[in-house]
Structure formats: structure tokens, C-alpha cells
Image (cartoon, rainbow, N blue to C red):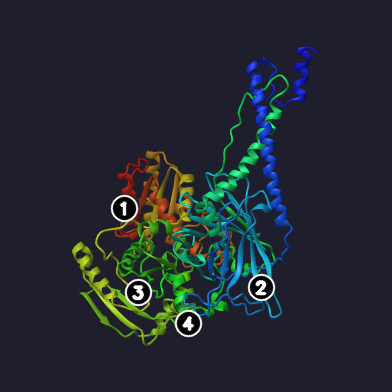
Amino acid sequence: MSQETDNERKPLLRSPFYNPNYIPNNNNRQSFSLLKILGLGFIVVTTLLLSINLAFFFIESNEATLPRGDSKIPYEYYLRLRKNDNWIGSNKFEYVIETSPPSDPKFSKLFIDKNGDDFNSSIIAEIVSRSYKSWFPAYYDVRENRNSSSYNYTVLTTQSHMSGLCFILWPPKVHISFLLKCEFEIRWDYKYFGEIYRKCSNKKDWTKVSYVKGSSEWGMQWLDPERINTYGIVTKPSYGRDGQMRNVMFRPDSPFPPIIPALYVAYFDRIIDGGDLEAHQCLKRTIIYFFVLLVVVGYICYDDQEITKPDNGTAISHDNHTEITIDFDEDGNIITGIHTNNQTNVDDYNNENILLMSDEGINQRYCGNDKCKFLFVYNHPDDETLANEHMRSFTQLAKALNRTMVLTNVGHSKISSCRNFPFNFYYSIESLLHVFPHVSFISQKNFKQWTRLRHEKPTTQHIFVAGGGVNSTINIVNPKSLESIQKTNCLDQFEMKFDEDTIFKKIRTGKGFWKLDETRSKFSKFLVDHLNEIDEEIILLNHDIRKPFFPGSLPKIDYSQLILQEADRIVNDLQPFIAIYWRSENQIPPSSKLPECAQSLVETLKRIKTSLGIENVYFTTDYPISSRANNLSLNEDYHKTIEILNSTIKLNTWKTMNPFKNLLENNIVLKNTKEFNGRGIHRILEKLIIINSDYFLSSPPGCGASYKDDFILSVTNARSGLMNEGNERLLNIITRW
């Protein structure tokens, strides 16, 4: 057969790697002989390893099949590393889950199941390695013991394994299957701190439910996603006759099943601490895959006269994102402890198990100590602009007192225990933790839950800090109506000892104490020294001071991403634009002057638009400027003012920009629409829009808010700071029309 004919035939018989222009030589024949020998050796080694794996696979497969059951692991248990070195001398990291003895004061008796089968008094579950059951390493079964009145038996509740190719340089992906509906992921960062994610069948996106820091050697702390509240801990191992032993203690409202911390430890040990075993198993499987790949490539890339290689290589990118996926069947019982959002909705007060816990155990779960000490500033008198500043001052106080700060609810541009939204609806928790890294925080919701769970209700002392009076003085006072204080400030929602035995004290700051760092330092020291003497678990604090009482200053707490992202969207849609602020606040002008103020605004705005070439205008006001505002209570002057504005200026307002559209599609949020129609979240949003406007106009004296308006001062200070930082887009700080 001619060479030409052969060149036409070979591409049909060989892979696309065949090169028809290849010129054979003797060196290629020598390479072929070497590859042939290596290929034969690969086949022999691969066959041997396959035979060994198949032998162990059949041995494990021939074991009796266990019945499947629901996981009933308690929220408190001992986790013991079993002593069971395998035939090559490597620990398989099998664990035993045991209950605490009845006399152990550290644990409650949450493992008792009063509905039927009781847990074994010692070993209740085993995490058993089944690595040869599949090609995937770290294949675990979770087997739980059941004791009934007639007989004892074991059920299989959980199976887990590493999936995909096992790489030695980074942790592999792990898949864990339960008999429940939801799925979970565990992702490690570069420090090998974990993040727990959950996705249930009725959700499309993953929700972060917990953050895990620490290690298997030094212990682990499981926190909420904001890293404020602690769900539980896994202690560092202790060593005794039975080997390594850890205590596992978790709150019953933890948003994940209690078996997950045990599996987390098992995989952490295998991946981090068990490097030799993982390296062995990964190397074994990697060698098999590599041998098979080389043999296949060897047969593809040679023929009886030549060996060829591809002209172009293929770039492979590996994703080193580590995750654990957990699936649930619809028949499991643990689903009762799993929730579909970031906040737990389980009513622990009605949970039968929680009644068995001691108050010290409840305290450990909510503040990390046997005795909790909270500072609860339940009301800040000013609107959000100043309340932000007050919050920082009292957080400094909580730090000085070594008390956990309660993050009071927000809403209607206030920080108050009567509001409906959590603190992080307005403010960034990450920013708060950055400014106060050494302060412990608890949300108002969890604080409320703590008071409800306590058997002996927590003690309180009430403090009212008032401005003026004699410098740094304190008096015991008698409240006029305890019931009125509770209802007015919504304190009756908390189950605490707030009654006629509660001590009420009034502390006076003195006049002008805030003007000098020296006097502020003197007052703050007096305040800290006295409050440190209070032994009650809760300091309930109210105040009417408007200035910081600690010397120096702290950065502001950033607003939440929800607000910042919406402000960025509106600013980007409007740029370039002029922002107008016209609010009466406490300076209500005579109605007869309103048309004159409106005409002056229109003329000033026309001049600015012409000189700067800016067309877009964002307008914020508390006057009813809508053309549909035909309220009978508005007189002719108001209607004339509305007509002047609407007939001459195209105004972009809160309503026309359609803010928080996606959020308002949520039915739960719709029930609180007052927050979005009045002086609520839109007040914050408008402040951010005005701060980032190209040009800022505000009302002159006699037409609205005064020069001392807190909103205007906050805006001008922020705009001044941006201009000092070199922001060239801002054309002024403020101009009065």
C-alpha cells in the first residue's frame, strides 16, 4: 500500500492526535519500546491494586444490611476517637458518640426520648469507616443504637464520602446523605475555618447558617453567620484510657442537625490532622487513575512505526473550593430542628427537651458563661442620625463593663425595643464587629428568647441617664408607674424580674459635660465605676443625652448592604443630579410663605441647571407635593405651592425611583409597609443619595429646617469629608436657595 494511501487511511483509524506529516526515525522506535515496557508495568500494578480494592469491597458488601432509621443524636454528647489502627498502621478516624453519665454536671439529659426507644446509656452511635465500599475515600456510615423494651438493634442513619478525584494539595469535596429533606454544605477558608450553608427543597439558593472557627486540636466554636451568637462548642480533646475524648454541646435551636459537628470533626481530622492516611488513600487512587490514563494514552498515541503527540495541550483549571453537601430524606425527625431562613423560628419555650436544661446550661448557650451579664439600652430618644452615635457610646460602655451588648431593634428611623426589625436591617454587623472587635453582642430576638428559657427569671436594675443637673451624681428614684414603663417601652415582652423589687437609679451628667474631653472622661469614669458595682444580670438603660460621653471619637457604623446597594443603584441611575432637601422638621413656616419659597427654589434651580448642565433632580420633602394630594386639610397656599413645583420641575422622588422593589414583594415585609412609607428606612436611603449628589440645595431660613438640623449636619459633614478625600464629582457642600 502506498504512503499516500496509508496517510489517507490512518486518520480514520487513529485519534485526531495522528500527524500525517511525521517523519519516522530510530529514536522514536526506542521511545516506543520504553513506553511499551512501562505500559505493561502499569497494567500489572493497576490490576493488582484493583484486585485488592475489589476484595475489600466484597468483604464489606457481604456484611449484613442494616435497617435505615431516623437520626436521634442529642445536642450534647461525648465524641471519642476509636482505637482501631488498620492493617497498614494508619488510623481510620472512626468515632464513637456517647451520652454523658447521669451524674455529669456539664450535660443535661437531652438524649432521653420519651416517645419510645431510649438511647443507650453509654454508646448511642458510631461513625464507621467504609473506605473500600466505593472508589471514593473517607466513606463513613453513621450507625445509631436503639434500645426498646423487647430488644436492642442498630440502624443506619447517615452515609458520607468524598466525591470526585482526591487531590492531596487541598481538601476534597464531601457528600453526606441523611434521611431528611434539606441539603447542607461545609466550606473551608484558607485558615480552615468553616462556613455551614443550607438549602431546603423549597429554596433555590444556599443560605449561610453558621460559621465555625477553631481546629480539632484546640477546639471549635460554632457561631451564627454574623459571628455574634454562639450555637455551641466542640472542646479540644482530652486523653485517657479510652483515647481522645471531646465534649460536644449545642443549643437545641441550632440550624443544623447535631450529627454535623461530629462529621465535621471526622473529616477535619482526615483532611488536616490525618494527612498520612489521606495522602495514602489519595495517592492510591490517584496512581490508579494516572496508570489507567497513561495506558489509554499510550495505546492511542502510537502505531507500529511511529509515536505521535498532540500539537496543542489542553489547559485544565481545578476548582479548590471545598464543600460538604448533605442531603435529607423526607422521613427524618431532625427536620423539626431545621429552618428555612437565617433566623431560627423554633419555639424553644415549648420544646420539652429545653425544660431539662439548667439555667447555667442556657446561659452557656447564649452568652458563653455560667452567668450572663447584659447591657440593654432599650431606647434611644433621637432619630437614626444621632441614635447611631448613641449606639457607639453605649457599646463602649458595654466593653468597659465587660457585659454583652444587646442589639436593640430598629424601625421608623429609631433604635428602640418597640421596633419590629432586627438591628442588621439598618446596620452592618461586620462594620460593628470591626469597630468593636472585643465586645460581645446578642440580637434582641435571642435576648428575648434567653429570658423566656430561663427557669429562674434574670434579675434587673434600671438606670436612667439624664443630661444637666449636678455633675456626676446618682440617686435612687421611685418610678411613677412600673406598668407604664413596661408598656411604653415594650419591656413586657421580656420575661425578667422587673417589678417592685427592681432598683431604679437616675444619673445626671451635669451641664455642658460633653464640651471637653476632660469632663467627658470624668463622667464616663464615674459611670463605669458605678455600673461595675451592679451584680444584676441585666442593666436596663434609658437616657436623654444627645452627646458622646466617652472622650475621643469612633468611626460610624456602616449601613447594611441592603441599603448601600439600593443607594448605589439610585445614584448611578440619576448621575449627574441635583439633590434638594426641603423639610419642615420643627421649623414649620407660615403657609402663606410656602408659594414664595417654592418660587425661589424654582428660579435658583433653573440658574444652577443652566450653569452646570445638570438635568436630573432628586427631591426629598415632607410636604405633600403630589398632584393627587387633594387633602381637604390643605389650604390654598399649599395647593399653590404644589402647582408651582409640579408645573416647572420634573422631580425624582422616593416613590418614582421605586426603591426596595424586590424586598417589598415579600409578604412578611408588606405587613410592615409603614417602615417604607414614613420616616423609616427611606430616611437613611435619602441621606445616602444626597451625600453622593453632584450638587446639594437646601431650604433657607424661614422656609424649613434650621442650620442646626441633625440631618443636614450629617450630610454636610459627609460631603465635606468626600471633597477633602479628593472626590471631584461633588461640586459643593451645601447651597441655600
**Front residue (pair 305, 319):** 305
Ranked by sequence position, the earlier of labels 1 and 4 is: 4
Compute the Cα span from label 4 to label 3. Answer: 24 Å
Secondary structure beneath label 2:
strand
Q: Nearer the viewer, mark 2 or mark 1?
A: 2
Secondary structure beneath label 3:
strand
Q: Amino acid at mark 3?
A: Leu
Which residue carries the number 2 mark?
146
Compute the Cα span from label 3 to label 2. Answer: 51 Å
Which residue carries the number 1 mark?
717
Which residue carries the number 4 mark?
455
Q: Amino acid at mark 1?
A: Asn
Compute the Cα span from label 1 to label 4. Answer: 49 Å
Q: Residues within 10 Å of mark 1 (few under 14, many from 20)?
A: few
Secondary structure beneath label 4:
loop
Which residue carries the number 3 mark?
541
Ranked by sequence position, the earlier of labels 3 and 1 is: 3
Q: Position of residue 715 (x, y in %)?
A: 35, 53
